[in-house]
Amino acid sequence: MTADANGRLWMSGIGCNAVVGYDPRTNQWTEANIGTTTGLGITVDAMNNIWTPTYPTATQLIRFPA
């Protein structure tokens, strides 16, 4: 699990084909189906992009509006 620069919480998990975000300020959820299985781990970079590893070999960049 990670938090972006806007305080939204992001989650991914093994065996799941989506990244899920939650905004506690608005009590709203965001789901991004990435079309492949995610791995363990998720992080945010300095540009507020969400990254998660995918299975079996690729890395998928997930971008959401800041």
Image (cartoon, rainbow, N blue to C red):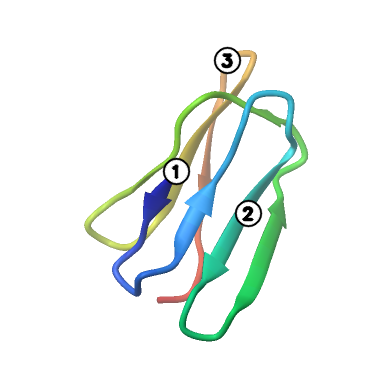
> In the image, 57: left or right of 66?
right
Q: Name the residue under label 2.
A: 20
Picture coordinates of residue 2, whole percent (x, y)? 39, 49
Q: Which of marks 3 and 1 is nearer the N terminus?
A: 1
Picture coordinates of residue 46, whole percent (x, y)? 22, 57
Estimate the spatial distance between the alpha carbons at disc 2 and disc 3, rounded to whole Å. 21 Å
> In the image, 9: left or right of 14?
left
Estimate the spatial distance between the alpha carbons at disc 3 and disc 1, rounded to whole Å. 21 Å
> In the image, 56: left or right of 40?
right
Estimate the spatial distance between the alpha carbons at disc 2 and disc 1, rounded to whole Å. 10 Å
Q: Earlier in the sequence, mark 2 or mark 1?
A: 1
- Residue placed most toward the observer, 48 or 4: 4
Relative to 46, is 29 above or below? below
What amino acid type should be assigned to the residue bearing mark 3?
A: Thr
Res 17 → quadrant: top right
Q: Mark 1 points at which residue?
A: 1
Relative to 42, is 59 above or below? above
Q: Name the residue under label 3.
A: 57
Task: Classify the position of the C terminus by image quarter.
Answer: bottom left
* Badge 2 element: strand
What amino acid type should be assigned to the residue bearing mark 1?
A: Met
Label 3 or label 1, whichever lies nearer to me, is: 1
Q: Which residue is drawn at 58% across and 39% down?
A: 12
Residue ranking furthest to the left: 46
